[in-house]
Amino acid sequence: MRRQEFQMQNEQEEDITAFLEEMSFGFLGLVDEDGAPIVTPLNYTYTGGKLYFHGSRIGEKMTALRAGSKVTFAIAKEYAIIPSYFSDPLMACPATSYFKSVRIDGEAVIVDDPREKALALEALMRKLQPEGGYKTIDADDPDYAPRLKGVAVVRIDPVRVIGKFKFGQNLKEKPRQAVEGGLLERGSDYDAETVELMRRYCPAHKQPLD
């Protein structure tokens, strides 16, 4: 059963978009010619409300995409492991993790237009190599034209987007405070940010970060 308190609502669409634009790695799910499921990890870019990835023009993934266009794509980021003892000194049950995840169900389109390919690949480069150090990818550039022709670029047109951001929305006030205190005391890489996100997505409990 889905926990509704963790599901992102329509008014939080901007948060889902920001997360998709922030991340660069996800998992493509599709079905091969024999009906067997395939999951492929790959880099992506999200621009203009569309998700793009690239790769070889041949291989298992492209064969499956030519056989059927319905796909799913999942992205997730774990922010913090929450030990049980943060809120319960005895029972293991409260142990969990806090994370953001988004799943896109949609139609995959193999892109033929070299200009759309160039725009998608340039967006990916800006994400993966924001410091620059390369010539802008341009479909009219004779150095890039043959390379654009030789690479496969796939666009996913979203049909359904599901976001799940889990940051203790189900907790009552006392255990919530205990978890926040445990995170701030531990001080691992994302712990302070996790507390900020707990307070952001639970506005009734929002308070300044110490």
Image: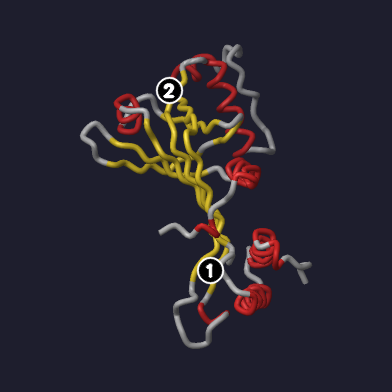
On the image, the x and y values in percent for residue 125 come to 60, 33
On the image, the x and y values in percent for residue 155 come to 48, 28
- Residue 110 appears left or right of 191: left
Please name the residue that numbered disc 2 is placed on: 110
Q: Earlier in the sequence, mark 1 or mark 2?
A: 1
Q: How many numbered discs sit on the rendered protein?
A: 2
SS for dot 2: strand
Q: Residue at x 53, y 14 (%)?
A: 145
Q: Of 106 and 135, which appears nearest the observer?
A: 106
Q: Residue at x 56, y 35 (%)?
A: 45
Q: Residue at x 64, y 67 (%)?
A: 191
Residue 82 location, quadrant:
bottom right
What distance separates the C-alpha of mark 1 from that of mark 2?
A: 39 Å
On-image quarter of the N terminus: bottom left
- Tell which residue pokes out farthest to the left in this image: 34
Residue 35 location, quadrant:
top left
SS for dot 1: strand
Q: Residues within 10 Å of mark 2 (few under 14, many from 20)?
A: many
- Tell which residue pokes out farthest to the bottom in this image: 90
On-image quarter of the C terminus: bottom right
Image vertical order of residue 160 relative to residue 19, above or below: above
Q: Residues within 10 Å of mark 1 (few under 14, many from 20)?
A: some
On the image, the x and y values in percent for residue 95 come to 48, 74
Q: How is the image coloured?
A: secondary structure
- Residue 39 appears left or right of 143: left
Q: Type of residue at label 2?
A: Ile
- Residue 138 appears left or right of 26: right
Please name the residue that numbered disc 1 is placed on: 81
Image vertical order of residue 200 relative to residue 139, above or below: below
Q: Type of residue at label 1?
A: Ile
Q: Residue at x 42, y 29 (%)?
A: 107
Q: Of 28 and 127, which appears nearest the observer?
A: 28
